[in-house]
Image (tube, grey):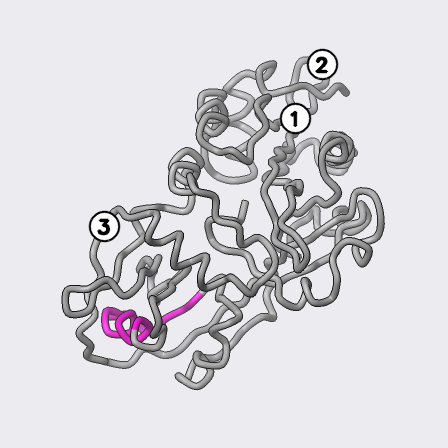
Amino acid sequence: MEIVNFDEVEDSDMIELNLACFNHTYSKDHIKKMIRSDKRMPDWGGELYAKEKGKILGCVGILFPRVKLSEETKKVGGIRNVCSRPSKSRRGVVKNLMERAHDTLRQEVELSFLMTPKSNVAYNLYKKLGYETVHVPPKAYKKAEEKETDIEFRDENDPEYVRSLYLESVKDLSGLVVREEDYWDMAEARGWPDNDNVKIAYRNGEKIGYSIYEFSRNSLSVKEFASEGNSKVLLQGLESICDKEYIVLSYVNPNYRDFLLNAGYSWHQDLWYSIMVKDLKNGVSDTMNIEDINNFHAGIYETF
């Protein structure tokens, strides 16, 4: 088994791998587009593929985001995707790819983050490789009630306004909260989050905040929101447009917990999806103190 870069892989192999693991297509052109738009991606693409007898068995993708800790903001590593052919599982493919990825990351950073459901078949492997759960992104939910407000949500392209309010809302938090200046273009290249779901909130003709949301089968799904001063009013505006049975908030800013509970929301953090970290050189406790772990947050645009 050899490990090669993406430019030695056919698009058809990429497509088959991604349809097996993620249910979407993929190509070298897509990777090149991300390299141009996403500053977290290394210029060589950050994609490693396991190859045997001319056949691609699996891949791992890496990138270099920034994490905010209590003492500094630092560059770290991220495992952004891991997959293997089902017919080649449990043959050490992912383990070999992860070890090569760690060797590559170790040349530049001390920490490696990844995001995975605990139900994922590779979760136990990640633990054996030294990853520990550092954060479970919380959700909050509430049965929808009819409400009337004077809040209006508009389709408006204003990425800097969104970024400035977001950074203000997470200024006292640690974690994956560093929103890069070109985050909007990064998302367009990557295909997620969907920028079309970003809405600017207005009240009496004045901007008061923003929200990222979409309607699912039986709920209004809110991925992020922030206001210029009154998050409760913004939340009431979201509740007023909800014609579904429930309103569900994901990746919830921990600063909102108290006012959400007071507003009748249930706080839920007993979830499968988790963010894990591995110290590539020492132990986790040597690099991340308990304050950083307790204040950890990950924004929707900062996940990978």
Mark 3 or mark 1: whose residue is earlier in sequence = 1
Measure the alpha-carbon separation of dots 2 and 3: 51 Å
Q: Which residue is mark 2?
A: 53
Tell me the tag on residue 269.
none
Measure the alpha-carbon separation of dots 1 and 2: 16 Å
Q: Is residue 185 left or right of residue 45?
A: left
Q: Which residue is mark 1?
A: 48
Residue 52 forms part of the magenta stretch: no
Q: Is residue 61 visible?
A: yes
Q: Position of residue 219 (x, y in %)?
A: 34, 67
The C terminus - image quarter: top right
> Mark 2 against mark 3, which lies toward the viewer?
3
Measure the alpha-carbon separation of dots 3 and 1: 38 Å
Tell me the tag on residue 156.
3
Q: Residues within 10 Å of mark 1 (few under 14, many from 20)?
A: many
Q: Pick whichever, 283 or 240, lies toward us.
A: 283
Residue 237 forms part of the magenta stretch: yes
Tell me the amino acid under the disc marked 1.
Leu
Tell me the amino acid under the disc marked 3.
Glu
Mark 2 or mark 3: whose residue is earlier in sequence = 2
Q: Secondary structure at mark 3?
A: loop
How many labels were placed on the picture? 3
Q: Which residues are magenta?
A: 234-249
